[in-house]
Image: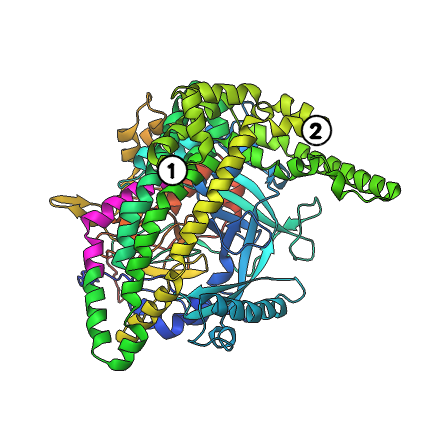
């Protein structure tokens, strides 16, 4: 008789109750020493060499810093290489300005999306650059070799600049690399970063804004989220693989490493790490700095940015052309405005200043317990307190002069671009002319050539300026900003011109703005072109927009000087406080604040509880898109075809148990600049793209809140679904390396014959 043995293998999942989350944005060169063991325990399967290596390809080689400069010192967003043809994913909001620049009424890529079905259809972007980190190096000892504690701040800076300049020149290898040297821990350490910068980066794909910006300003910084926040670019190189400006003979980049993509999805407690270029945090800020932000700095910016958005909104709603023109400006302003509102709320609700005070009290007790420490650190906190108090007295006039004056209405700032031409047009004083007639003529001829060259250069930029400019909106903005300036800056601290115009026009800045735009050459494209074809001094000298610009610039120089004087002792005191803090907590591993250099953060996929009796799941689904749909609200319009796909459950290989995951949460520690960063699983596969933080932890740039702080990520499966099923851009899908684990059986049978 045959014997049949049935062996049952039951898969049992048990939660150990431990949430793997690591506060901090870590320099990847230290991964093996500081983080690797804990990361392995949390689910990392890669070796330290596969994560970061100078000699071999590693994860770092797939991470891209995005900038508008050919030699950037920092990055506005992060991207990741996802194919062996230089294909790059980032956020939709990171590519938003580029998409807007390519958009017209006839080709409205913001509204309708853009998909290149071949390399020939990809769109060039002359100002966009992609930087790859070659290596990073601790150069603290070299930079500070000529620095002593007896030097003041200016002397320290001068000594360090001289050494830094020599080091950067040597590391650039005759200009092949862009070398950036940055301060860490408030000037206590220094690191050098060597980048290879590619200047040919082309737009490949972008979903319509109804997907890429779904939820708009209402959902910004909020969970639950249903935004397909991604766009696609491609990095190109010269035929030999080296960086090169745009040229037809350029080829798609052959990267050192690119990220494969996982279709396995995420489960709660899954390992997740994020790489990128976080812009700025201030985790070691004192209570004095927190209160300075809350009471002196943030209110003015929130007020002015909010007023600016209110002015733009009706003009954008009334005219699609204006909506395209102002889309990028509005998005940037709205993001900052809501961020500062959220951070103000978070700092207050979480009593961050009080927590800082507790640490400062510990620091004071530690300092006073030792005479040597008292000598070195005894005056640090009192100096910080007095410095912030002086800065608070000077900051409001500076902010209103900047954001309501020079950077309020565009006509004012644009007029100042003509200051150089204005100086050249000034009549030459006869006393300055040489007595020799030939020499005098030569001097006049040279001046005429300079005027011509300046006018031609400015003329070349006119189209670009007016492409995204709408005078009626800017006129209203000028009146609004001047009113805010007049109301919030004491009369004795204002530029006299504003006070004069307030009285001259009987308190109506609307009437004054009307006259500025009626008379200024900067208000209308053809008017300005006519002037530049025959420039004269009298026209600029009488131009009301340039008059305003000069008046605000004079006040700005004064206000800035006063603020800098108040700020003078701040950096040295912050350096000493940081040094003392690390000495006091010598058993703690400190991470440096973000400063737009490559960082790695790791954690897990997690839900959270934002308030009493509220539990947020760690994923959102396509069901939520339909629940939020509102055809009357531009922020919540669902494209008809997307709606059809969702209603038919036509998710292809990107669905999970009959549903489509849209976004997910992780505990990673990120900030601005991480937008577009890859979310990577333990096997080094791309599982999502980071794009936001959550509203309840908006104080996170100053104080990390592990129970509340979450990163909002678009699930990579939703990205692929939009590319494939919605857009039909299968050429891009074919280019990717896509992994999906083979399901393991819950039961196996062994049969003996």
> How far across and down, in percent of the image, does residue 692 sit?
35, 46
Residue 654 falls inside the magenta stretch:
no
Comparing labels 1 and 2, the label whose residue is closer to the camera: 1
Q: Is residue 236 visible?
A: yes
In the image: residue 629, left or right of residue 509: left
Q: Residues within 10 Å of mark 2 (few under 14, many from 20)?
A: some
> From what the image shows, is residue 305 above or below residue 516?
below
| Stretch in magenta | 335-356
- First in residue order: circle 1 vs circle 2: 1
Identify the image quadrant of residue 446. top right
Residue lying at the far right in this picture: please name it.
438
**Depth order, front residue of 472/123:** 472
Q: Report if the CB atoms under discs 1 and 2 are less than 8 Å apart.
A: no
Q: Label 1: state its secondary structure.
A: helix
Residue 678, given in percent of the width and then of the height, sits at: 42, 53
Apparent side of residue 258 relative to residue 27 in the rendered image (left or right): right
Q: Residue at x 32, y 55 (%)?
A: 388
Q: Which residue extends farthest left? A: 613
Where 548 sits versus 704, above or below? above
Neighbour tally class for label 1: few under 14, some 14-19, many 20 plus, Cα within 10 Å: few
* Residue occupied by mark 1: 492
What residue is pinned by disc 2?
Answer: 535
């Amino acid at each position: 008789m045959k014997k049949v043995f049935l062996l049952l293998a039951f898969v049992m999942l048990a939660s150990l109750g431990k949430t793997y989350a690591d506060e901090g944005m870590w320099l990847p060169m230290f991964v093996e020493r500081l983080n690797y063991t804990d990361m392995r325990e949390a689910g990392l399967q890669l070796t330290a060499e596969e994560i970061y290596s100078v000699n071999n390809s590693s994860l770092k080689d797939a991470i891209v810093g995005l900038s508008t400069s050919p030699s950037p010192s920092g990055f506005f967003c992060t991207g990741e290489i996802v194919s062996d043809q230089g294909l790059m994913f980032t956020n939709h909001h990171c590519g938003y300005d580029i998409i807007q620049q390519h958009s017209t009424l006839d080709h409205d890529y913001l509204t309708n999306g853009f998909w290149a079905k071949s390399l020939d259809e990809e769109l060039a972007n002359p100002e966009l650059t992609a930087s790859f980190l070659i290596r990073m190096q601790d150069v603290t000892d070299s930079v500070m070799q000529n620095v002593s504690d007896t030097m003041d701040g200016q002397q320290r800076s001068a000594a360090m600049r001289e050494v830094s300049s020599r080091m950067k020149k040597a590391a650039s290898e005759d200009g092949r690399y862009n070398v950036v040297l940055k301060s860490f821990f408030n000037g206590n350490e220094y690191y050098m970063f060597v980048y290879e910068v590619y200047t040919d980066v082309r737009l490949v794909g972008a979903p319509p804004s109804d997907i890429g910006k779904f939820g708009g300003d209402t959902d910004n910084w909020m969970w639950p989220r249903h935004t397909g926040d991604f766009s696609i670019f491609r990095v190109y190189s010269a035929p030999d693989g080296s960086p090169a400006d745009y040229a037809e003979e350029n080829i798609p980049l052959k990267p050192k490493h690119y990220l494969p993509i996982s279709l396995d999805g995420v489960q709660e407690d899954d390992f997740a790490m994020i790489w990128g270029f976080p812009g700025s945090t201030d985790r070691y800020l004192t209570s004095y700095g927190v209160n300075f932000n809350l009471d002196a700095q943030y209110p003015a910016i929130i007020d002015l940015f909010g007023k600016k958005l209110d002015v733009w909104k009706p003009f954008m709603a009334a005219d699609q052309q204006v909506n395209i023109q102002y889309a990028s400006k509005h998005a940037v302003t709205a993001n900052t405005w809501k961020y500062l509102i959220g951070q103000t709320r978070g700092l207050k609700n979480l009593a961050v200043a009080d927590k800082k005070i507790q640490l400062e009290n510990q620091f004071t007790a530690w300092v006073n317990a030792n005479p040597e420490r008292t000598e070195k650190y005894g005056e640090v906190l009192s100096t910080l307190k007095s410095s912030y108090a002086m800065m608070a007295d000077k900051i409001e006039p500076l902010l209103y002069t900047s954001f309501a004056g020079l950077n309020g209405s565009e006509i004012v700032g644009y007029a100042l671009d003509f200051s150089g031409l204005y100086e050249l047009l000034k009549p030459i004083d006869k006393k300055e002319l040489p007595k020799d007639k030939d020499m005098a003529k030569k001097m006049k001829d040279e001046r005429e050539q300079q005027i011509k060259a300046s006018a031609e250069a400015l003329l070349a930029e006119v189209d670009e300026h007016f492409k995204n400019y709408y005078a009626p909106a800017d006129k209203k903005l000028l009146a609004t900003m001047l009113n805010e300036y007049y109301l919030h800056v004491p009369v004795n601290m204002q530029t006299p011109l504003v006070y004069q115009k307030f009285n001259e026009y009987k308190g109506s800045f609307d009437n004054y703005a009307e006259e500025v735009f009626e008379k200024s050459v900067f208000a209308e494209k053809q008017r300005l072109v006519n002037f530049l074809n025959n420039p004269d001094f009298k026209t600029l000298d009488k131009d009301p927009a340039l008059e305003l610009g000069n008046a605000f610039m004079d006040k700005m120089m004064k206000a800035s000087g006063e603020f800098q004087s108040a700020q003078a002792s701040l950096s040295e005191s912050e350096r000493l406080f940081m040094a003392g803090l690390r000495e006091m907590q010598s058993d703690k591993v400190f991470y440096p604040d973000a400063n737009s250099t490559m960082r790695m953060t790791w954690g897990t996929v997690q839900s959270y509880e934002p308030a009493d009796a509220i539990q947020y799941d760690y994923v959102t689904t396509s069901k939520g898109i339909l629940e939020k749909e509102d055809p009357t609200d531009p922020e919540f319009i669902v494209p008809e075809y997307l709606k059809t796909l969702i209603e038919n459950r036509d998710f292809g290989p990107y669905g999970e148990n009959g549903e489509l995951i849209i976004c997910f949460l992780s505990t990673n520690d990120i900030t601005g600049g991480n937008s577009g960063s890859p979310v990577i699983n333990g096997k080094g596969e791309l599982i999502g793209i980071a794009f936001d933080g959550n509203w309840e932890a908006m104080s996170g740039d100053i104080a990390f809140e592990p129970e509340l702080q979450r990163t909002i990520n678009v699930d990579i499966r939703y990205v692929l679904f939009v590319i494939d099923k919605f857009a039909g851009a299968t050429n891009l899908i074919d280019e990717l390396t896509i992994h999906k684990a083979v399901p393991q059986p819950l039961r196996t049978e062994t049969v003996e014959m």
